Image: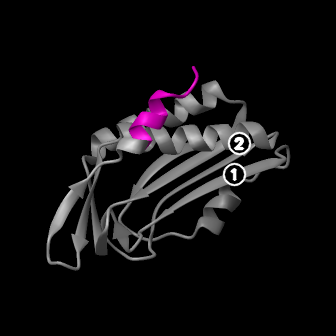
Amino acid sequence: MIEFRISENSFEPETERGRIAEPSCGGYVSFEGWVRDCNEGQQVLRLEYQAYEALALKEGRRIMAEASKRFPIANACCIHRVGELEIGDLAVWVGVSAGHRDEAFKACRYIIDEIKHRVPVWKKEHYASGDSGWVNCEACANHANDQPA
């Protein structure tokens, strides 16, 4: 299974992990991105994620297919939340199972970096000061461009 989803609802990573487990796989790697309470010196109260869903699904699925071609993996899943999220909420999850740990690590890193760089999901931070602002991930974009082909 190679899958990308957008979700308005919370989900359990352990349930998703069970969906990608495979007896032939000795390696499993996951990444969880949580809502943190600060960014660039400002106290964050909550986040709001919005997506251009049709394009996000298309591009997310394209990234997942690329990962399955680049790395010898058995299964991979990425779920990105949209809507209002509170501090500590799970915003994005990636799970990869593979025969060995190295390809699972590499594929997981590739997926999250490309998702952050290419998928039209936007993050709005709401600050304790009463201000808010849309945020992008320059560091992720720069890292994704450094990945070997």
Residue 18 drawn at (x, y percent): 70, 61
- Compared to 124, does 147 lie above or below? above
- Of mark 2 and mark 1, the one earlier in the sequence is 1
Which quarter of the picture shows residue 108?
top right
- Residue 130 is left or right of residue 92, and the answer is left
- Specify whether residue 31 is in view: yes
In the picture of the structure, the residue carrying the numbered disc 1 is 29
Q: Residue at x 74, y 51 (%)?
A: 28
- Specify whether residue 61 is in view: no
Dots 2 and 1: beta carbons under 8 Å? yes
Answer whether residue 72 is magenta in the image.
Answer: no
Q: Residue at the top extreme? A: 149
Main SS, magenta region, reads helix
Residue 27 drawn at (x, y percent): 79, 47
Neighbourhood count class around disc 1 (C-alpha, 10 Å): few under 14, some 14–19, many 20 upward: many
Determine the secondary structure under disc 1: strand
The one of 58 and 70 positioned closer to us in this rendering? 70
Q: Residue at x 71, y 36 (%)?
A: 73
Residue 3 drawn at (x, y percent): 53, 45
Q: Residue at the front extreme? A: 41
Type of amino acid under label 1: Val
Q: Residue at x 39, y 77 (%)?
A: 87
Type of amino acid under label 2: Ala
Q: Residue at x 57, y 49 (%)?
A: 77
Q: Quadrant of the C terminus?
A: top right
Which residues, given as a range, are shown in magenta? 140-149
In the picture of the structure, the residue carrying the numbered disc 2 is 104
Residue 7 drawn at (x, y percent): 39, 60
